[in-house]
Image (tube, coloured by chain):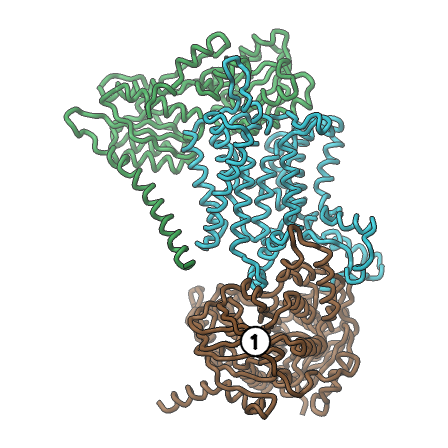
Chain colours: A brown, B cyan, C green
Amino acid sequence: MLQEVLLRMRGIGKSFPGVRALSGVDLTVHAGEVAALLGENGAGKSTLMNVLAGVHGDYDGVIEVGGEEVAIHSPKDAARHGIAMIHQELNLVPELSIADNIFLGREPRTRWGTRDRPAAHARTAELLAGLGLRLSPRRLVRSCRIAEQQLIEVAKALSNNVRILVMDEPTSALADAEVHRLFEVIRDLTGRGVAVIYISHRLEELEEIADSVTVLRDGAYIGRRDMAGTTRAELIQMMVGRPLGDLFPRETGEHGGGDVRLRVEGLSLRAEAGRSALHDVDLTVRAGEIVGLAGLMGAGRSEVLETLYGVHRPAAGRIELDGEPYRPRSPRYAIRRGLALVAEDRKAQSLVLGNTVAFNASLAALGRYTRLFVDRRRERAAVAGQVRDLRVKTPGLNATVRNLSGGNQQKVVLAKCLLTEPALLLMDEPTRGIDVGAKAEIHALMSRLAGKGTALLVVSSELPELIAMCDRILVLCEGRLTGEFHRDPAHGPPATQEDILAAAMARQAVLDQETADA
Amino acid sequence: MPDQTATEEETVAAKAGGSPPRLRTRMRRLLPVLGSLQGYIGLILVIVLGLATKGEVFWNQTNLTNAVGAFASRGILAVGVTLVILTGGIDLSVGSILGIGSMVSAMMLVHHNLTPWEIVPICMLVGAFFGLCNGVGTTWLRIQSFVMTLAMLSVVRGLDRQYSNNVSVGTQVVNDQGHLTPHSAQFQDLGTPGHNVLTGVLGQGVYYPVLALVVVCVVFQLILSKTRFGRHVYAVGGNATAARLSGVNVTAVTITVFVLSGMLAGFAGPIDAAYSASADPLAGTSYELDAIAAAVIGGTSLAGGRGTIVGTFVGALILTLLDNVLGLNAVSDNWQLVIKGLIVVAAVVLQRPGFFAAALTPVRRLIGSSPREGDEK
Amino acid sequence: MRSLIRPLVAVVAVVTLAAGCASKAPSSSGGSGSGSGGKKQFVVGYSQSNNAEPYRAQLNLQLEYFMKQHPDMKLLPIADAHQSSATQVSQVQNFIQQKVDVLIVSPNEPAPLTAAVQQACQAKIPVIILDRSVNTDCYTSFIGGDNYEIGKLAGQEAVKQLPNGGNVVELRGIMSDQPQIDRDKGFRDGIKANPKIKIVADREAKWLKDSAVPIMQQWLSRYPKIDLVYGQNDPMTLGAYLSAKAQHRESQMKFIGTDGLAIPDGGIRAVQLGELTSTFVYPTCAKEAADTAYAITHGKQVSKKQVLHTTQVTKENAAQLYKQYDMSGKIGG
């Protein structure tokens, strides 16, 4: 059944100044195969793929493509051998249109040597349609949401004639519906003999899409398994080198019996460029309760959190905090009223990447340590406490945040929020793109906070996470609430993936029905 | 210094938290504000060049004081510009604001016979007002700071020229007996070349422009590294969105840095007027470029979020001492321009964080020493 | 509330700007209505290269004053080219459009202004060129000082001041400016009379006092003996004087400047106060320009080239010269 070996990497090694990032790594990929690459952040997956894509000019070891040894010293070399890579960090020019981005550097020409825009637009529209994206090729990338931009990246890679496509966490920003769409595309590609190297932290995705999985740890090769017949527990053990307890350590039982911390009635928000509308959203969160917000991309989940946090100005709605009226004015005011936000995009919205751990962690709570001057000793003691509690892996409080792994960066964001001692913690995709170990620790932290009486309102695209962690799950669709599910069946319908997805796509179904009738 | 944002170098305080600070820790805490040796390479090179070619003539108090004094007003502008650049903006109007500050000071002295104690605050207020205009334009009207301050450069210079009728105003006011009036004499203390103040209190005294520059640098370095506002400045420049979501009032911080920059430019006005004993309608023209150059040579990133006042001070010293050394060596004006440009490039490259580590890597690999742990990719 | 402020600020800004423009508009358009009223009025346009130089500001004041002495001459608001030749070309063309009776130009640079002056000439508008030349003969009269002569006289004064020879330093204006080149050449020719006078250092101080101060400081450190400072304009020379005074060496040397403006901060006053040894008046040409314009409009012959001679300012004649050239009392508003 397996076709011939398309790519073989043997004994790959790579050093950076002062760091041995990879040593002796093997990777074999067959044509038509989805080969998953698994490992915690910092395990060397991205480095290995950067070697393959020609990002790093020099490396040790041998790369064979189609049985022939090749030297890959630049992205051009990689492209010549039919290797394309979709980086985790988006590589798009925000001020150009989708079509211009996809054909950047290889624009189709007319007979007279001018740019053939109609051809580019037609081809782009075709590619987008193949991914189920309904966007105009003329639209500026700047005005697209992250998920859409990611799919445009996919389209861009697809527009090249690829034999080996590397996808570095392509689904980290996608909601479930988009993920399924992407998987269809991947299956379509492999059906045509293309090999896909797939990097992801989501084990359940790998079970669905991957044929084989290769595990790396600390820059070293750990092993290769066929996906069929390999258990999740086994893979996790290979990744972390030790058996891991429950991924979602929230004990079952009665939660959320506390007072109402947040009551929202009739919250509405007008749509603007890059933000969805909200219509008449009602919700409550009690002290000690974890409430989840589910929905597809663009359903308005982030907008609920951001509006509560004072980023957007609501068009209508009444909000109460602990029974007192609350009108969101600015993030500053929200923090003063006991709110904190773990934003969706930690690099763009939460962290000053070029600055230190201490600087970032204390930024929101600086007033607590300041009279005329910042009391550096108290500040550092407080930050050090959080760094210890959250088990942030950092060389020191003065380490630059940019150099930390994704999981540790997210922990710094959490430290920043926790130092303000929030009564209501808003979390937008708190575990996106971080490794399994850090994920478990963040889940444990959420349970701990709820246990201490903090109210949590959590947005996540990973339904298993929401179902495991939340006492209640609210589902948004097109800016409206379309479902409410409970951990405790005594209070209402129980949360299952199928029901939540159905609610999330409820309106879509209605719209589809309407168009079908017409 | 220039490569870091005023933070300490001590390792995790979590462990060191309890123990009493010993002298060494305290020293280590102080040093990082001054930065690593690398930040001073440009300065050291210029000084070595000066000592090697001119020795005594270069390295004596009079010459050094003169050299720094010649740049003092631009150095003060550079401090304000550094603040603005740290937030990710730029201020091109400081040269013009210095110009109007110097003109206002001369007018106040000549026509209203005010004392320097009254003149300096008035000039600072005038400067702060134009800074406020810059701040309001960049925040409320959402004009990019480059455009807004470029416009102010023109507006303020025009007002200055209109106010002065294009005629320079001398600040040496003579009474009937042919002596300087008391207020004029006091005013000249602000900047007359070679004239020292606080003589007696401070031994031989200090040259006021140099004193003013040093005090401004110390005060603003303290503000940047010790106060909440200083942290917010770095946060706004490093990532304005993250700063806003962390509860920083980005608008207020932006307006404040422009006001401070304008205020410092206004403060530098009287010094400049006293320095040349007159307020010229063209005073301060193109000073903003020197100020920006000093900040950049000192390691301030034009992208914002990185840089220190100490760095800017060193950058200013490099520029002015280089000018001095070349002048003392009678290098022709044309070649001075060439050399200055090249040194600016060299200083920026040499002081880039990690430059030497990167330069040494191939060497180290050749020698074959084992790799040490360092920052990961 | 806050959403109101932003537009409000914008509106205020726009209104202010508009008002600023409007207040200027009538005066410039009103000028074109020449010939109105019973008596014929002759309209004169003057394009100045840069108002912000004190010498030129003084020239503007004087020209306005001397024009007022002729009741049937009307001077349009002076156009300032801000040191930009392109701006000046369009200003000259504007005056041609307005059909002024006489056009006076102080060219910023010779070459770029040549075509514009020729245009005026073709439109039969008499042109008076002040101070700097243009590369065409198609003008009515040129009035200017002789920079070479002024430099040479300064050199001769240096010879007089240093009978036993000595070390001279020279502060130069912007190197590419023609007056700089001429004054330098004249000065060097002037001191040839005494071979024991040596120029030990010269540098570009860009006509600016601020630039001259540190340059002089460096010279003072470098040369233990400086006998005379020659500055190509008074501000540079005064800057050097400040530096020397700070080191109490001002009495060891002579200071010779150029320009001799009768303003409180100018060279004549500085000679009077004993700061400068001597300076040379660079004539503003204002009176001559006004008289020439009057002569042209009244059909009289004018000479094609009028070279004005300088006056040396010394301690003896300074007070009297100041009175003669001072404009502050003569112009009301």
Name the foreground residue: A203 vs A367: A367
Type of residue at label 1? Arg
- The chain holding disc 1 is A
In percent of the image, x 37 and y 25: which residue is there? C60
Residue A77, quarter of picture = bottom right
Rendering coords of residue A502 (x, y %): 51, 89
In percent of the image, x 46 and y 46: which residue is there? B133
Relative to C38, say whether A505 is above or below: below
Residue B157, quarter of picture = top left
Q: How many numbered discs?
A: 1
Name the foreground residue: A238 vs A490: A490
**Kind of element beneath mark 1:** strand
Give neighbour class at mark 1: few <14, some 14-19, many 20+ (Cα, 10 Å): many
Horizontal side, residue C117 vs residue A51: left or right: left
Relative to B338, say whether A73 is above or below: below
Q: Is residue C313 visible?
A: yes
Q: Is residue A33 visible?
A: no
Horizontal side, residue B238 vs residue A103: left or right: right
Residue B219, quarter of picture = top right
Residue identifier under label 1: A261
Rendering coords of residue C110 (x, y %): 41, 30
Rendering coords of residue C29 (x, y %): 25, 37
In percent of the image, x 67 and y 57: which residue is there? A369
Q: Quadrant of the N terminus of chain C?
A: bottom left
Q: Quadrant of the C terminus of chain C?
A: top left
Q: Residue furthest left?
A: C38
